Structures are given as C-alpha cells and as structure tokens.
Amino acid sequence: MTESIDKLANVLVIDDDDISNFIYTRVISASGIVENIKSCMSGQEALNYLKEVSENNPEQFPAMIFLDINMPVMNGWDFLDQYNQIIPEQVQSNSILCILSSSVYKDDIDKANTYAQVKEYVPKPLTTDYLKTLFKKHFS
Amino acid sequence: MSPNSDLSVIANLPLELEEFANIGVWHYNLLTGEITWSTGLYHIYELNEDDFDGTFENYRQYIYPEDVDLVQRQISEAIESKSTFSFTKRIITGKDNKKTLKTWGTIALDESGEVERLSGFSSDITESVNAERALIESNEFNKKLVDNTANAILIQDYDGNILYANETSAKLIKAPSVHALIGLNTSHFHDSKKEALIKGRLEQIKLTGKPAPVMEQEFTCFDGSKMVGESTVIPYEYKGRDAVLIIVNDITHQKRTLQALENSEEQIRFFVNNMPVSVAMFDKEMNYIACSEKYISDWWVQDQEMTPDKIVGLNHYEIFPDVKDEWRKIHSIALAGETLSREDDSFVKANGKKEWLRWKNTPWKNAHGEIGGIILFTEFITARKEAEEAIANSRNRLNTLIQNLPGMVYSCGPPPDYSMRFVSSGSEEITGYTPDAFFGEGKIYFEKVVHPEDLLKSRAAVKKAIDTNEQFDINYRIFTKSGELKHLHERGQALYNEEGELLSIEGVVTDISDVMIAQQALKQSKESLDAAQRVSHLGSWEFHLESGEVIWSDEYYRICGEKPGAFTPTFEIGASFIHPEDIEKTQKAIQETIETGIPYKLNKRIVRRDRTIRYVESQGELVKNEVGQPVKVIGSMQDITDRKITEDQLQESRLRNQALVNALPDLLFITTTDGKFLDAQFSDPSQLILPKDDFIGKNINEIFDQEISESYVEKSRQAERTKQPQTLEYSVTIKEELKYYEARIVKYAKGKVLSVVRDITKSKIDEKNLIKTTEELTNTNAELKQFAYITSHDLRAPVVNLDTLLQIYKSEEFTEEEKDEVLGKITSSIDQLKSTLNDLIQLVAVKDETKSELVEVKFEEIVNAITNSLETQISDARATIKKDFSEVPSVISKKTTVYSIIQNLISNAIKYKSDKPLEIIIKSINTEDGYTCLSVIDNGIGIDLKRHGDKLFGMYQRFHENKEGKGLGLYIIKSQIEALGGYIEVQSEIGEGTTFNVCFKH
C-alpha cells in the first residue's frame, strides 16, 4: 500500500501530554511513511522550531503538522494565530496542518474550520489506517 | 438574296424587336475594316449615329479597358478557326453607363473560302447579370448549382485521360454513363485538326499555372453528332496529381441560331424563335409565321403540346378563340401600319390574379416595303411591378414618416467627425437650426450644440454602441440656436456593410424636455406629498379595478410598519395587514363604494408584523373615467393610534372611578399634589399602617421615608400636569414583614389627586421567585453544558490514550524495557482518568450542595483537616503554613464547599511553588460591604495576570507548562463560591507569589 507513496521527510507533532506524544510517534512510525517525527511539548517550542526551519532550510519544513488544542499557556488556537503571522504563506502552503483533538464537540470543529490553514480535523485516537488515508488524500 | 439585302433585312426588320429585347445587330467587314451597327445597337451604346465612325479603333474605345484584350483575341481566333463564337464583354456607353453585353458572332466566307465578314448580335444582359448576381447570393441558387449544374465538368490529366466527369458531361457528349467516360482520352471527342492547338493550350497551362482563356470548340459525341461548347480550362490538383479542370458550356443552341442567321429566309424566324422574350410574328391574316419559346410558355394554356415549329401556319384567332375584341382592334390598327404599345397594361387572369403586362404591336414590312403582317411582343412584368409598387410604397411611407416625425432623423458618417449626411426637417423644431445649417461652408457640428457636461458621456455611449454594434439610447441636453436649454433623447445605431466596414450612424433625436420637466415636477410633488403624509401620518392608496393593481404611498407602508416600497402591494397583502375582525367590514365598504359610487369612511385596526396594533381612520372613493365607468378606488388611511390610546385611557379612567366608588377593593386616598392626606376610604381597616385619624391632615413625608414621599409628590404632580394616571411601586416593612404596594395616582381636582393603593406583595414575591428559578435553571443549563464538555473532552482523552496504548502493547513486539514504558504510560493514563473523575464529582457536588444546610464553619478546624490530609505534599515541598483566624474565626456556609476550596488553593500553592522554601499564609477578615474574606497567600512562581487575568478562572485554562493539571481547579472554586453568593479575586506578581481572596457573603 505504501509503495506508491514517497516517504515524507518530516512530520511534527505538538501536544503537551507526553502520553499522547508517545502514542503519535509510535503510530506514525508504525505506518512507515515518515522518515522523521519531531514532537514538541508546547506551542511555543513548536513555533521556535518551525520559525528556525522556515528561515534556514525551508525544504525541511514538516510536510504534516499535528496540533493539539488543549494545551497550557499557548493553546492550539493561540498557536494558529502566531503560526499565521510568523511562518510565510508560501511555506505554510507546503504543509498539511491537522488539528488533533479528543473533543468531538461541534463548537471545536466549527472553530477549527474558521482557520484557513487547518486542512483536517482529526478526532483522537490517531490510527495507522486513518493516517494512511490522510497521506493518500494529500500526497498521492 | 445578296449579302446587302441580308443586311437590310437584319438591320431593318427586327428594329422593333431590337428595341424591345435590347438586342443589336452588327457587321464587321474585314475588307474595308468598316463596322456597321443596327439602330438597336446604337441605343444599347447610347450613341448617336454621328458619334460612331465605324472603325474598330473607335469601337474599342467603348469597351471596358480590361476586356479589350478578350474581344480582340475572340475575334482573331474566330477568323483563324473560321468558327462561330460568343463572349461576354463590358462596355462604357456614350452616357458613361457601364453595361454588360453578350455577343454572338459568325463568319461569312468569300468564294475563295477566305473570311470576308463577321456578323452577329449583341444583347444587353446588364440587368440579367445583375439579377443573376443577386440570385447567386441566394442560398437556394447555390444549392441548385451544386445539385445540377448545366455545365459539363471534367478533370483530366495532362495527357488527356479523363479522371472525373459529372452527369452533365455524360449527357452532353451522349455517353451511356459517367463511368463510360472515365479513363477515356478527350482526344476521342476533339476535332483532330484542333488537337495541336489543344495540346498547346495544355502546355501553356502547365507552364504558367494560369487558366487558359475560354475557347470555343466542336466535340464529336458518342453517337457521332456534333456539339459546340465553350471550354474553360483551369489547372487543378486531383488526388495528388497535376491535372486540369475543364468546364464546358454547351453553346450548340446559340450556334444554330447564328447559323440560321446566315440564311436570310430563316433568320427572322430563328430570331423570333430564340428571342428571350415573348414574341410572335404573324402574316396579314394573323397566321403564325414564327414565335419564341417564351411566347408559348407565356400564353399557351391548352393541354396539347405546342412548339414554335408546330404553331407555324396556324391562325391566331383559331387557336386563341377567346381573344377579346379590344385586341382584334389593336391587331387591325397595327396591320394598317401603326405601332401600338403599352408599358404597363394590366388584366385579370382566369385565376383572378391581377397581372401586369407590357406589349407592343408593330407591323413588319417585306423587302418590297409592303406590310407583311405584325409582330407582337409581350412581357409579364407583374413581379417587377409589384416590387416597384412595394418599394415606392415603402419609400413614400419612410419619407412621410421621416418628414413628419416629431423629432430629427439623421444619418452621419463615422467618428471622429460624425459629419452629417442627412438631417430631416425636424431639426429646426428641435435645435432651431434648419437641416441646411449642418452642411456646407460654416456648417454646424451637432456636438457643438450639446451641453458640455453631457458631451463626454454621450460620446462614450455612442462609441461603445458602435464597437459592439448595438443600438444606443442616450439622453443629453443641448442649447438651441436661441440659447434655450433642451433635454433630448437620441436612439441610433451604426450601419455596417458586408465587409464589416462602418457605413453610417443613423438615428432619431426627440425632444424630451417636457417629459423631464414633468418628471422633475412629479418628483417634487411626490416629495412634498410624502412629507405632508409623513407629518400627518396619512397614507394613501389606489386600487385599479381592471388590472387589480394596488399602489401604496410611502406613509401607507410606514403605518403598516414596513419600509416604503419594500414589496409590491396587492389587495391580498393589504388585507393581511388588517385586523381579522375588521377585514369583512373593510371589504364590504370598498365593495359598496365600487357598486354605488358613494365614498366610505370607517375605523379599523392595522396589525403590523410585530403584532402591534395601529388604529386607523380609513376613507375611500370611486374614480370614474370620462364615460362614467369605474376605474379605480382611491383612499386614505390616517394613523389615529395615539388619539385612540388617549381615548381608551380616558375611558378606562372613568370606568375605574366608577368601579372604585362602587366596590372599593383597595385603599383609596385623596391627597394634595404636595402629599397632604385629605381623605381615605377602605373596606378593611386592618390594611392600614396607621389608624385613619392619625394620618389625615398629615403630609406623606411624616409617615413614609424620604424616598417614597418624594416619589409620591413627584408622581402626583405629574398626574395633575399630564392628566395621565401614574403608578408608583414601593415597599414598607410592617410588623417585620416586607410588603409591596402599588399606588395608581390620578388627577382628582385642581391640586388634588386620587391614589388607589393595592397590596402587591404576593405577586411581587411570585415575580422574585420566578426570577430566581429562571436564574437557577440558566445556571443548571450552563453547568450541564460544561459537564457534557468535560465528559467529551477530558474523559475521552485518557480513555482514547488507554485504548491506543493497549493496542500498541498487544500488537507490537517489545523489549522488556519498552514494555515497562508502555505499561507506565497506561498507569499514567489511568491516573489522569481518576483525577478527572474526581473533578467531575466535585463539580456535581457543587450543584448538590446548594441544597445542603448552611452551618457555622470554623476555619481553624477545616484548615487543620486539610493540612493533615496533604501532609506528605506539604513536607515534600518543605512548606510552612501560617494561620490567622483571630479576626473572623468562622463563617456561615457549607462545610464541604469551604473544605474543597481551601484544599484546592493549598494544592495549587504547593504545585506552583518556586525554588524558595514555600510559605503559605491563610487568614480571614470581614470587609465593610458584608463579606468574610479568606486569603490564601503564597510566595510561589506567581501568575502573569496581564496575560492571563481574564482567563484565569475559565474552564481548561492552564498557565504553566510542564505542570500537571487540567485547568479545572480554579474554575471549580469559582463555581463553588459563586453558588454561595460570594466571589473570588486574585493578586499576583511573577516570582513574588500569589494571593487568592475567597469572599463569602454573610
């Protein structure tokens, strides 16, 4: 199934919960479609990393970003506002940003849809099958 | 007959015929070089006999320059080949007219066989050429041409082998079929003497790649008969091969005619036979000598076949027994030597159709100068006549129209000049300038009279219309010759020829000044009417009986609570605004007015969409036209709601007085407007605060507090001044019970008011309870929503994690270490789940506790219990806790809530401690505004209140990374304290510490 798809060089996971981070890293690496998985424990850490990459080697910019909403200090929405200001649109357009949330509340999904850069709203748990569907949709 | 007598016959006899058929005869004597023309030919050339000297050079001058070569070549080829010929040429006549002539010619040989003379005739085919051209343009003709062309079309290679032939080819050459021709060599059909010439032509074509000139040649048909054709040869590529396309026009028939010409005895007959017009030649007894094919087809209506050959010798009156006397008379006059003609005679055919005819009856003379009989020419000109009539009519109509239009019709040239080509007489009325003023020296450019402000706009509109080939419609102003300003409307369009070239712009200009002035006046009058209606709340309406159209004025819309023009009103829409109880009487009134013509007037209610009711006074009357037929109903509708309300209130007040006097259900006082009690009436003395005698004569301010007495005096004065009832609500505590009263104050007499006081305590309490219940319900709803959110979000997260972790654990192969790691994560998830469940239990508890009993909660006792339960955390954090409850040792509240709040705050202090040893101070104070405040002060890391202050107590808000927590603690505390009617506040400095004040209402 993966033969037809080129491996993605970089994927970023942003979640303050280390268990969730552990799970995503496992699930994504088990899918075998990604070379490198980077995980950040806070929105600020992720922003610093993304800013650095977009300025110095934009080709290494994560092809996919999984973002949790419920995080302390800078929640997912705050992150999106900053992301939009800091990362050039050109770089943004090469990346698929997915909201990853355990909330199945319609309010949250509606709010996610008001952000242009949010391409997917992924309800937890993230599964290998769902991941493959996402890859297929956006990269094949 | 000698050649000379031939000549005289040819030249003289057919003169009438020549004129009629536009044919002229010519002879070219090669020995003398002299060219002789018949009279008819002079007519065709539009020359007098003196103008033409008979030389070839002179003749050549009248030939169209481009055709001179053709004529010379045709003549020299004819001499060389000693054959007959025909060609078409164009000439310029003596009157500079261009004409097209078709010329047929033959040769006359002398005794030694040399060509002595060329003779022939030329026919003016200008009109038929023109007609043909017009016909060619029609699709039908094209189609017919393709379907069955009269020309033979052949394709052959340069060796003469036929590659393709059409049906006509086979027919002309009398071949059994087209297939029989394919592959044959054309030399089979040629005169062997011409073979070299034909080969030469082909080589010439091959060499130059240009078509060869038309050549007349004789073909031998399959059955041995001869056929004469004119062939045009064009180089052509056929299926990738070099070939020639040959078009052969069968001219055998013309040839025969010409040959007949040579025979003087036969020539006239042949002439007549072959005339393209309807002509018949009779002897003195009216027996046919000859007639043309056309004559037969025009006149022969009987069943048996008739031909120009068969008719010879038959008597005219015998074969046409119905010839009228009138015609017999004409014939006899002609036989007596007179020529009779009519250019436009008409008669009615048997089928009732009116036919137009031109005819000529002329005698002919034999060689001896005696009348030999008559020649009759006829031509049906019905079609032409009808067309002419139609054109004349349409021209007349157009002209009449143009000159009588109430405007100016113009035609002008293309931009940028737009110079006028035609201006109708209407220009004078519109611009003050006569049409002539727009032409010649010092002419006026129309743009010059246009108002400068309108010029660019109208120019752009015209330009755009020209570019898109659409009609333009523009309004602009001009200054007339006398300086008057006029509003004009112009409608026009550009005309293009077939090549898409702009020929002219044509249009009509009309004066719309009156319209514009009227429009403006209408607008002004409508505006002032609008204003008047708005001020008086008077709306007007119209109902057109025939069309059913309904018109409302702007104010009518407003009375109905709608925006003016918001919709197109109809009778039904109108009815929908009328109060259901009033619809029937309104419709009845309108119906009666329509039937009787008597105006109606009625009061009704308008119900707006927001259900408010307007009282209106409605009137209507019938409008009739000049002949007394009803046309429309017009009416007005005045909003009298305000007046109505006042009336109603007055009525109500009267009724109330009546009721009060009769039943006295309440306390009734009469006071001065300054508040002095004059009298009181009541049914139940126990309702009074004081015995009657204790307050009569006293002022209200001696009995009630300042606020109530001042309000009472104010309302009393207002009641007197406005004559409107006033209400005043107040409360007093009577025997430790709070009682609510409502006083309704009305003017009683000058300086005196009547006040009716009613005890409304019960309804007031009900109202308060209702508000409280609503608030509680709202809170419960909000809490339920929060609960659902937590369930969805915070419970789901660890469960989802657990699920995934277990799957990972089951499905993957691990080392022991990794297995431990996953198990560790599972344990953490379960802890998270537990903690969330605890939070939820607390939240649910908050709700339940609202029902539990309020007790005296001693701070000391509670804090000790908490420090005991948190002993390990406190000692781990090496925290010291200082307590000071000396000022306020306890609070009346709910024990569990207070416990929960303090426990949460201490946990937070421990969780967010800094590197310094943690010190927590807990103390209680009473505030001035009736609260007991418990403060929990720490020296921890602090909170950035500028950044997070507004979110601090929100659900799921966390302000520190790398700390456990779900962001619910402070939210729960806030919910708990607010449920008790208190509040929580915070002060904090980053790096200094945080103070939470939890304030309980007494």
Image (tube, grey):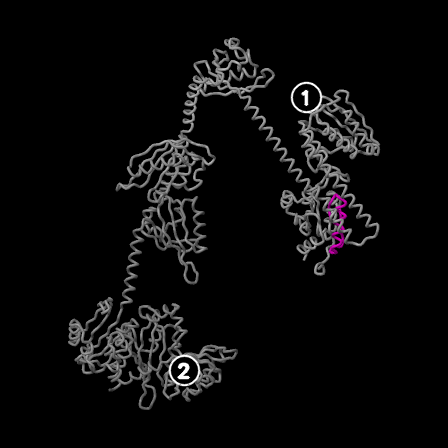
Q: Amino acid type of disc 1?
A: Gly
Q: Residue furthest bottom?
A: B112
Subunit ID for the residue under disc 2: B
Residue shown at 77% from the left, 38% from the top: B963
Q: Element type at marker 2? A: helix
Residue shown at 39% from the left, 52% from the top: B492
x, y (%) of residue B718? 48, 18
Residue B144 lies in the magenta stretch: no
x, y (%) of residue B11? 25, 79
Q: Amino acid type of disc 2?
A: Ala
x, y (%) of residue B113? 33, 89
| Quadrant in which the N terminus of chain B is drawn | bottom left
Give the image quarter of residue B175: bottom left
Question: How many neighbours does mark 1 have within 10 angstroms: few (below 14), some (14-19), or many (20 or more)?
Answer: few
Residue extent of the magenta highlight: A13-39
Residue shown at 22% from the left, 72% from the top: B360
In the rendered image, the vertical position of residue B545 relative to residue B265, given as above or below: above
Looking at the image, residue A130 sits to the left or right of residue B181; the answer is right
Asked whether disc 2 touches disc 1, contact meaning CB atoms under 8 Å apart, the reply is no
| Quadrant in which the C terminus of chain B is drawn | top right
Give the image quarter of residue B323: bottom left
In the rendered image, the vertical position of residue B733 relative to residue B542, given as above or below: above
Q: Element type at marker 1? A: loop
In the rendered image, the vertical position of residue B199 relative to residue B517, given as above or below: below
Residue annotated with mark 2: B170
Residue A25 lies in the magenta stretch: yes
Subunit ID for the residue under disc 1: B
Residue annotated with mark 1: B930
